[in-house]
Image (cartoon, rainbow, N blue to C red):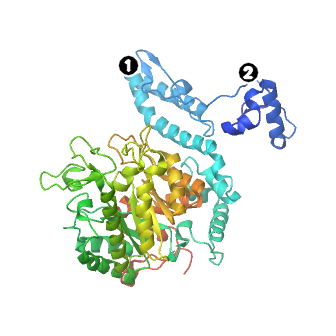
Amino acid sequence: MHAYPFDRDMSTFIVETDEQSWQNAGLSCADEAGSVRYCENLFASELEGGKLLSNKSTWIKFNRIKNATWRHKNSVLIGDAAHTAHFSIGSGTKLAMEDSIALSEAFSQHTNVDDALRSYEDLRWVEVAKLQRAAEVSQRFFEDIRRWKEFDPEQFAVKLMTRSKRVTHDNLRLRDPAYIANVDRWFADHNGHKHLDPPPPPMFIPFRLRGLELMNRVVVSAMCQYSSEDGMPNDWHFIHLGTRAIGGAALLFTEMTDVSREGRISPGCAGMYKPEHVTAWRRIVDFVHTNSYAKIGMQLAHAGRKGSTKLSWEGMDEPLPSGNWPLISASPIPWTSLNQVPREMKREDMQLVIGDFVRAAQFAEQAGFDILELHMAHGYLLSSFFSPLTNRRSDEFGGSIENRMRFPLEVFDAVRRVWPDHKPISVRISATDWVPGGFDGGDSVVIAKMLKAHGCDIIDVSTGQTVPHAQPVYGRMYQAPYADRIRNEAGIPTITVGNIQNWDQVNTLLVSGQADLVALARAHLYDPYFTLHAAADQDYEVDWPNQYLPAKPRRRKGT
């Protein structure tokens, strides 16, 4: 129920429900009076004896209105005629009033009607777009509310209040410090850390996967560096990963590390396909383990149809001018018309690739890595089997989602058999193609359940990059809803990624139950010491490298 004052004596009263509950209640065949009586009974305790007044009341689907332009000649649209915002944000009247003010100001500054209307639209466009985006996210919360019905009340309340991303964990702390202190206490207790008193911020609550204990919830996401020769990591990788390890994150992943020379994206991609690679990677792993509390994982992959291209800064996804190697994929579909056509994999190709992944996993164990991540996202080889847009096979590896998952699961099973039982395996997926008719969020829940049944420990949830004509909807934490859905519908831990910019967003994602770990890429390029600085900003004590202790900030709340 959404209710807000209408005048001195009455309030607007809106009832919102998912369609299945509406059908179950018999409301699809109820008349206006019957619907009013049902709602009076349902909300009797909230109404406290009050009656609902009908005014041509009816059940409707919310009308989301957007217009490419709000003006034509000397006519202009304002308010709901130009743009609607779901009533869970409660901003319809506010939008109309702000539009009116902006329109009046535009005419006070311009004598020409066309100039005034153009100025009005320019002035209001960004703010309206931001509010409509928040309203759409808020609307989805209420439409998907069944997903969180098992949440404890503490977490459900935080989820409700932070649903549109306009309110965050730290914003709630400013409003009510005692409330967030209780939320943080619940989060620590719920995750088995009642002994931590006072409770740390959510991002500093430890997390366990099999035998792997992580000191906090921050992950350095895999970031391709395109700086290897024949797959060999070098001093650049040593500095890149070593710096971020001492920066406070609990887990860092290598860049996409290819299981064969032919499986590379570019000549500069890192690999794990030669014995010499083991020694080079071991140097990095040993540094991380000796000089930090961070754990380090290797992300294994095969580029498939997106291989044999230039370094990213020389031309993203552009084929090499010479020296190209042959490509394989689920189906013979090139990435673009400029890229070479891959060979559709035969059974013998699949067996070779499985062998490459097994060898790489064994090498990773020899190098001392703590966790493996299999890259099944972003249109690379294993990902190409997922989507009906890139898998057009008519054999047992195409067609239904069960068939399309057959080969990726064979790879996973083979790796799981050789990877030590006490060490976890993550799988990175693209939870949607961002294309109508492609792989989508519902499919991602299905494959997450399959991977969980095969022994996957956590899903690293990304989106897109599977086809070049995708139309992603970017924004703050824009991929988190997919991690949320997989976590709470498939019942498996998730890592969320995607335009996560600061520690407040990390805390918000964790305490609202959208993910179990939060991975940041660009934020760690900008600030390798992101986690140490986040602790200082929140006045929370963490260990700093001894060599850096002179720079460690003093706590504000005592020693």
Label drawn at residue 76 = none
* Residue 4 in the image: above or below residue 488: above
- Given residues 157 and 483, the one toward you in this image is 483
Q: Mark 2 points at which residue?
A: 56
Quadrant into which the N terminus falls: top right
Quadrant of the rendered structure where residue 255 is?
Answer: bottom left
Q: State the residue lying farthest toward the top.
A: 74
* Residue 476 in the image: above or below residue 127: below
Kind of residue indicated by mark 2? Lys
Q: Which residue is drawn at 87% across and 37% down?
A: 49
Q: Residue at x 27, y 68 (%)?
A: 271
- Given residues 119 and 273, the one toward you in this image is 273
Q: Where is residue 32 in the image (x, y as percent from the top left)?
A: 77, 24
Q: Where is residue 379 in the image (x, y as percent from the top left)?
A: 35, 51
Quadrant into which the C terminus falls: bottom right
Horizontal side of residue 66 vs 195, given as left or right: left
